[in-house]
Amino acid sequence: MDNHANSPFSKLVHLGLIIKDLDKTIDKLSSYGLGPFEYREIPPGAEEWYKDKPLKASFKIAGVNLGGLDLELIQPVDGDSPHMEFLKNHGEGIQHVGFLVDDVDKEVEAMKEKGAKVQLRADLPPKMKVAYMDLDTSGLVCELMQLKE
């Protein structure tokens, strides 16, 4: 029996890996046979908030599909973000686990009631809405992602 069928954790879609150098990381991972990597950009018109303030940061991002799971490589370049904070405090590593949900706002409120904290919120036109939730245990940060219709 699947105890998570109706939870926000039922659809694992990606792992967010914070790195220091995107190109070097891609070269190294490609040498092991991972790839092809797809470079990504934050879409024009994106609205992002970190700690309830407008996010002013830049990143280099790429991803690769690993058997249905996306490995997202994020190199924080400048500015204040959860990605830069992670890199400064922990070095490189898995910073978040991404789950697809039907309603980001509903899940955020439910998690906040249980003690989770919102790290980042974003509206990424034309198709996605996200929230990073610090679950306040074991350093686990979940990215909740909602596809907009």
Image (cartoon, helix red, strand yellow):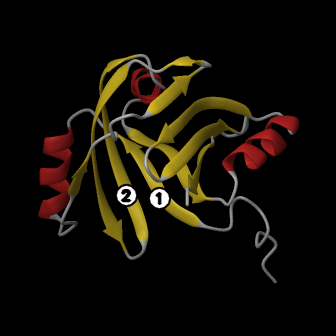
Quadrant of residue 37 in the image?
bottom left
Q: Residue at x 68, y 68 (%)?
A: 10
Residue 98 is left or right of residue 30, and the answer is: right
Label whose residue precedes the other's in the sequence (1 or 2): 1
- Secondary element at tag 2: strand
Helix, strand, or loop for circle 1? strand
Q: Is 147 placed left or right of 91 in the picture?
A: right
The residue at 43%/68% (across/down) is 69
Q: Can you say whether 105 is above or below 4 in the image?
A: above
Q: Residue at 47% x, 30% y: name it.
A: 47
Q: Nearer the viewer, residue 75 or 48?
A: 48
Q: Nearer the viewer, residue 16 or 112?
A: 112
Question: Residue 71 shows which numbered tag?
Answer: 2
Residue 62 appears left or right of 112: left
- How crowded pointer 2 is (Cα within 10 Å; few <14, some 14-19, many 20+) is rated as many
Q: What amino acid type should be assigned to the residue bearing mark 1?
A: His
Q: Is residue 131 visible?
A: yes
Label at residue 65: none
Q: Amino acid at mark 2?
A: Leu
Whether residue 139 can be seen here: no
> Do callouts 1 and 2 mark residues in contact (Cβ within 8 Å)?
yes
- Percent from the top left, x then y, of residue 12? 57, 64
User: Marks 1 and 2, Cα distance to the nearest angstrom?
Assistant: 6 Å
Whether residue 32 is situated above or below residue 122 in the rendered picture:
below
In the rendered image, residue 26, in percent from the top left (x then y), is placed at 18, 51
Which residue was labeled with disc 1? 14
Q: Quadrant of the C terminus?
A: bottom right
Above or below, 1 relative to 13: below
